[in-house]
Image (cartoon, rainbow, N blue to C red):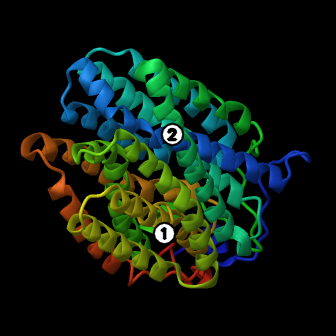
């Protein structure tokens, strides 16, 4: 039997909640602009690291598997660190967490520029950079952004923030390639570290407190209760499972696509411009996903995106490998690239609310990063053993189709907690 206090928390769903602590000058528009800038810098710097595969392995005498393992570990530590970063952001505010993360992230990039052994590469590029990315992640900025807008604008704002991350990829891919050619790969990594430190003043513009978001009504719920509720919701489990595939696709292409392009005998600049083109087209894709998720079913949108990814990869495998085909693939994949994020985070906010959004998305994102780990690492392993990436591309086709099916049964209706005993949820 529920205690009276417990029963009150379960049934009192119209209690108003306080917005996050925000000084008068921290207007919603300023918070949104700062969050977009943080997403652009953090994601842009990370997306350019695949450009360092060939120059670093050639200079240090490492195999592609060695470099791939470092970035695979980075993705894994990113995923492992993000749930904790989400908890801290929900309690203390994203501002402080992002500032600490930026310092750790920059330290990892600086160390990556100076290491000479594979072990230290894995430590700095893997553990340090991965944890730094987790604690300065664009998902924390997204969570801060949605807490300062009304519920009916959340999906659009999530699309806007995701598009900003893509804009960072557009800028940082050719910028990093230019730095590599002008000052060398080590100097380019130091330059990226300085850009990452620029997130610190931007984070000061975000709300300082944790807060619970702008809700017309909310339940007085603890973090443990929220986690228990999400775990028992079938849609949340399916969403977590499907996001694994997103990580597998994105991480493999980000790290290995420039080398894949060069293996085809094409100019290395095609690989750099391909990454930039992915980011450019994903600006439109993310915004479109945000608007579509506001109007139509988010689960059907996700299913369509994963099926389209499988079709795009299949076309790449079957068509002749000309510069036009490579750039065309990049453009199509760009539309589908991070368009999963506003829909995935939108479902979480729609079903569970935004109070613990950073935490709940952090757990979903851990699945994404496990997929990222396997996508990056297996890409290096299979290439070193087979001399080709074809096996990874075919795996991407199969996983895309499976993800399209997994999202179809998700129940994206908001929870009605007053009818739920003990925190159990409709799934």
Q: Residue at x 38, y 69 (%)?
A: 237
Name the residue beneath numbered marker 1.
Answer: 229
- Residue in the foreground of this view, choosing between 317 and 196: 317
Residue 316 disc label: none
Instruction: Pick whichever of labels 1 and 2 is earlier in the sequence.
Output: 2
Where, by quadrant of the figure, is residue 380 drawn? Answer: top left
Q: Note whether 10 is above or below 85 in the view shown.
A: below
Q: Position of residue 89 (x, y in %)?
A: 62, 45
Name the residue furthest left. Answer: 385
**Can residue 212 be seen?**
no
For label 1, the SS is helix
**Can residue 99 be seen?**
yes
- Residue in the foreground of this view, choosing between 60 and 36: 60
- Residue in the foreground of this view, choosing between 135 and 186: 186
Residue 174 disc label: 2
For label 2, the SS is helix
Q: Position of residue 144 (x, y in %)?
A: 68, 52
Name the residue furthest right. Answer: 24
Crowding near pointer 1: few (<14 within 10 Å), some, many (20+)? many
Q: Note whether 232 is above or below 358 in the view shown.
A: below
Q: Is residue 310 left or right of residue 379?
A: right
Q: Note whether 57 is above or below 303 in the view shown.
A: above
Q: Residue at x 40, y 78 (%)?
A: 303
């Amino acid at each position: 039997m529920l205690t009276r206090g417990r029963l009150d928390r379960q049934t009192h769903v119209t209690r108003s909640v306080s917005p996050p602590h925000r000084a008068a000058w921290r207007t919603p528009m300023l918070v949104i602009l700062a969050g977009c800038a943080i997403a652009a810098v953090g994601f842009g710097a990370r997306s350019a690291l695949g450009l360092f595969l060939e120059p670093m392995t050639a200079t240090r005498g490492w195999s592609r598997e060695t470099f791939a393992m470092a970035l695979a570990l980075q993705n894994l530590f990113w995923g492992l660190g993000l749930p904790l970063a989400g908890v801290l952001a929900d309690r203390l505010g994203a501002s402080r967490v992002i500032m600490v993360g930026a310092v750790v992230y920059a330290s990892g990039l600086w160390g990556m520029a100076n290491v000479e052994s594979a072990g230290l590469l894995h430590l700095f590029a893997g553990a340090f950079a991965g944890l730094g990315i987790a604690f300065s992640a664009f998902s924390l900025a997204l969570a801060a952004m949605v807490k300062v807008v009304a519920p009916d604008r959340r999906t659009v704002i999530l699309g806007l923030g995701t598009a900003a991350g893509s804009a960072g990829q557009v800028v940082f891919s050719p910028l990093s390639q230019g730095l590599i050619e002008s000052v060398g790969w080590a100097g380019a990594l130091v330059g990226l570290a300085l850009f990452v430190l620029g997130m610190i003043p931007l984070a000061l513009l975000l709300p300082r407190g944790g807060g619970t978001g702008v809700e017309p009504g909310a339940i007085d719920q603890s973090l443990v209760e929220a986690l228990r509720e999400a775990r028992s919701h079938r849609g949340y489990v399916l969403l977590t499972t499907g996001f694994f595939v997103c990580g597998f696709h994105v991480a493999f292409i980000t790290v290995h696509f420039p080398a894949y392009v060069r293996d085809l005998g094409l100019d290395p600049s095609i690989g750099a411009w391909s990454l930039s083109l992915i980011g450019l087209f994903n600006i439109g894709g993310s915004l479109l996903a945000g608007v579509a998720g506001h109007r139509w079913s988010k689960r059907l949108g996700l299913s369509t995106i994963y099926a389209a990814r499988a079709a795009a990869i299949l076309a790449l495998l079957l068509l002749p490998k000309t510069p036009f085909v490579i750039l065309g693939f990049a453009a199509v994949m760009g539309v589908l690239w991070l368009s999963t994020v506003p829909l995935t985070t939108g479902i979480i906010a729609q079903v569970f609310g935004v109070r613990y959004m950073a935490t709940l998305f952090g757990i979903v994102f851990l699945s994404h990063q496990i997929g990222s780990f396997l996508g990056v690492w297996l890409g290096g392993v299979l290439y070193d053993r087979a001399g080709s990436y074809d096996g990874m591309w075919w795996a991407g086709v199969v996983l895309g189709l499976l993800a399209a099916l997994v999202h179809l049964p998700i129940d994206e209706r908001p929870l009605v907690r007053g009818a739920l005993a003990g925190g159990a949820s409709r799934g």
